[in-house]
Amino acid sequence: MKKMTITLGHRNYPITTSSELLNHFDSFELLKKGDQDMLVTNQTLSPLYLSLIQTVLEQGGVRFDHIILPDSGKYKSLSSIELIFNELLKK
């Protein structure tokens, strides 16, 4: 696993890279056992990674739901945010 910081003006962004990143609960640094979270993904990535992420998070004691959005830049919109907020409120 390799960690680096990207500096853009006054802001810094931590980035972690690894071919095994999604296989280890420790990669999800902000999550802890007992958390309940929402994963937002798209139709392209969900068939590739959703099952793996679900397994890793469940092994780490995290419960989560997910929302799968269509895959297109046009879904990066206020209506998609509204959909996500509504689902969060339901949960």
Image (cartoon, rainbow, N blue to C red):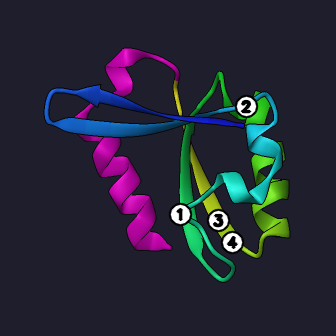
* CA separation in Å, label 3 and label 2: 23 Å
Q: Is residue 63 left or right of residue 55?
A: left
| Residue 50 screen position, x and y as percent | 74, 42
Q: Residues within 10 Å of mark 4 (few under 14, many from 20)?
A: some
Task: Kindly identify which residue carries mark 3.
Answer: 64
Cβ atoms at labels 4 and 3 below 8 Å apart: yes
* CA separation in Å, label 2 and label 1: 17 Å
Mark 1 or mark 3, which is nearer the start of the sequence?
A: 1
Describe the element under mark 2 as helix, strand or loop.
Answer: loop
Task: Kindly identify which residue carries mark 2.
Answer: 18
Identity of the amino acid at label 2? Ser
Quadrant of the rendering where the N terminus is positioned = top right
Mark 1 or mark 2, which is nearer the start of the sequence?
A: 2
> In this figure, what is the number of numbered marks?
4
| Residue 54 screen position, x and y as percent | 78, 54
Identity of the amino acid at label 1? Leu
Tell me the magenta residue range.
71-91
Task: Kindly identify which residue carries mark 4.
Answer: 63
Q: Which disc is residue 30 wearing? A: 1
Describe the element under mark 3 as helix, strand or loop.
Answer: strand
Picture residue at 85% right of the left edge, 56% below the top: 55
| 35 is within the stretch colored magenta | no
